Image (spheres, helix red, strand yellow):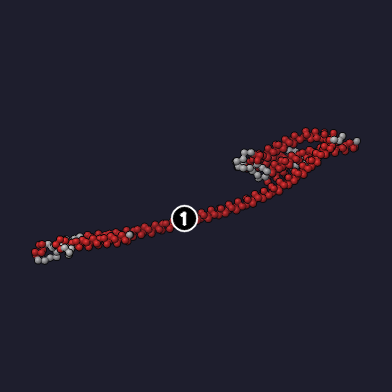
């Protein structure tokens, strides 16, 4: 802008010089110079033509106007620049404060989420270890029950081949076969209710209160279900409700794929029912033997 002002002033000055020079060209007086008024020349004197410098005053005024206008324009431009810089600085400071605070909050929330994720991860690992330990314990117990059942089966075959004891055993087995369907039906009903309960636990649409109501009803009915003296159904159900957190994939449509511990317990209950039946038959045979000895 300053170069523009200087250029305007220099141009006006040059124009004035050229104008004055053109008015009085000493190299070509007859052609370029403005002669004095003939009347004044004849009168014997005078200061020449008054129009010689008539253009000087407007040009000086124009140059002064341009200089003043350029100076005021530059001052206004500088003021606008200062205001713009102040506004930009103020907006930058405000944005830094605002987004700096937001960034701190986001980082804090991310740190809290990381802590929660780590806590949940450790809790899940603890559940997995507990489930693995419990599963191994159940497998050992299942193995023991199978061995006991095999022993009872061998003893049953041996007793069937004997006389009076065989007849008593056959009667006991017939009675056991008559009672076994009731226990199997109770197990099937219990299995269906456990599958439904685990489905409610894994579903994100079903309310928690509905699942808790189902659990309470199953605990109340556990007293009525007779699976044998060796089955503590109420305690086992509480253990399932507390520890069985296994759910299949989100897109799973087979409800029987949910749950892990409950299936171990169901197999255990089935074996326990079988063992209890053999024990009752064995007790009946022993009572029969004792009766025959008394006779």
Horizontal placement of 12 versus 193: left or right?
left
Question: Could you tell me residue 28's position as x and y percent?
Answer: 16, 63
Question: Could you tell me residue 38's position as x and y percent?
Answer: 10, 62
Q: Is residue 83 above or below residue 247?
A: below
Report the residue at 87% width, 34% height from top. 163
Tag 1 secondary structure: helix
Of 157 and 182, the residue lying toward us: 157
Horizontal placement of 14 versus 147: left or right?
left
Horizontal placement of 41 versus 225: left or right?
left
Of 189 and 8, the residue lying toward us: 8
> Which image quadrant: the C terminus?
top right
User: Residue 162: in sight, yes or no?
Assistant: yes
The residue beneath circle 1 is 95
Q: Residue furthest bottom?
A: 45
Q: Is residue 132 above or below residue 177?
A: below
Q: Quadrant of residue 188?
A: top right
Report the residue at 41% width, 57% height from top. 87
Q: Residue furthest right?
A: 295
Tally the numbered discs.
Answer: 1
Q: Quadrant of residue 180?
A: top right
Report the residue at 81% width, 41% height from top. 151
Of 212 and 155, the residue lying toward us: 155
Question: Could you tell me residue 259's position as x and y percent?
Answer: 66, 42
């Amino acid at each position: 802008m300053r170069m523009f002002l200087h250029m305007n002033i220099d141009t006006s000055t040059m124009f004035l010089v050229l104008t004055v020079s053109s008015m009085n060209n000493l190299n070509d007086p007859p052609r370029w110079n403005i002669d004095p008024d003939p009347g004044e020349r004849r009168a014997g004197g005078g200061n020449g033509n008054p129009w010689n410098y008539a253009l000087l005053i407007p040009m000086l005024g124009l140059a002064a106007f341009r200089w003043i206008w350029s100076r005021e324009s530059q001052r206004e431009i500088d003021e606008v620049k200062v205001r713009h810089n102040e506004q930009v600085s103020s907006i930058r400071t405000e944005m830094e404060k605002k987004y700096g605070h937001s960034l701190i909050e986001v980082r804090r929330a991310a740190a809290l989420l990381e802590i929660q994720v780590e806590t949940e991860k450790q809790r899940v690992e603890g559940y997995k270890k507990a489930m693995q330990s419990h599963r191994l314990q159940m497998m050992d117990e299942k193995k023991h029950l199978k061995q006991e059942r095999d022993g009872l089966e061998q003893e049953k075959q041996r007793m069937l081949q004997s006389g009076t004891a065989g007849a008593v055993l056959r009667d006991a087995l017939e009675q056991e076969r008559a009672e076994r369907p009731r226990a199997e039906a109770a197990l099937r009903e219990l299995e269906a209710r456990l599958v439904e309960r685990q489905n409610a636990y894994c579903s994100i649409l079903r309310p928690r209160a509905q699942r808790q109501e189902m659990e309470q009803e199953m605990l109340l009915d556990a007293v009525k279900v007779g699976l044998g003296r060796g089955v503590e159904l109420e305690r086992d159900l509480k253990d399932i409700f507390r520890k069985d957190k296994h759910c299949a994939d989100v897109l799973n449509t087979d409800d029987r794929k949910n749950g892990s511990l409950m299936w171990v317990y169901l197999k255990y209950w089935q074996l326990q029912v079988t063992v209890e039946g053999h024990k009752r038959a064995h007790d009946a045979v022993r009572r029969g033997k004792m009766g025959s000895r008394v006779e």
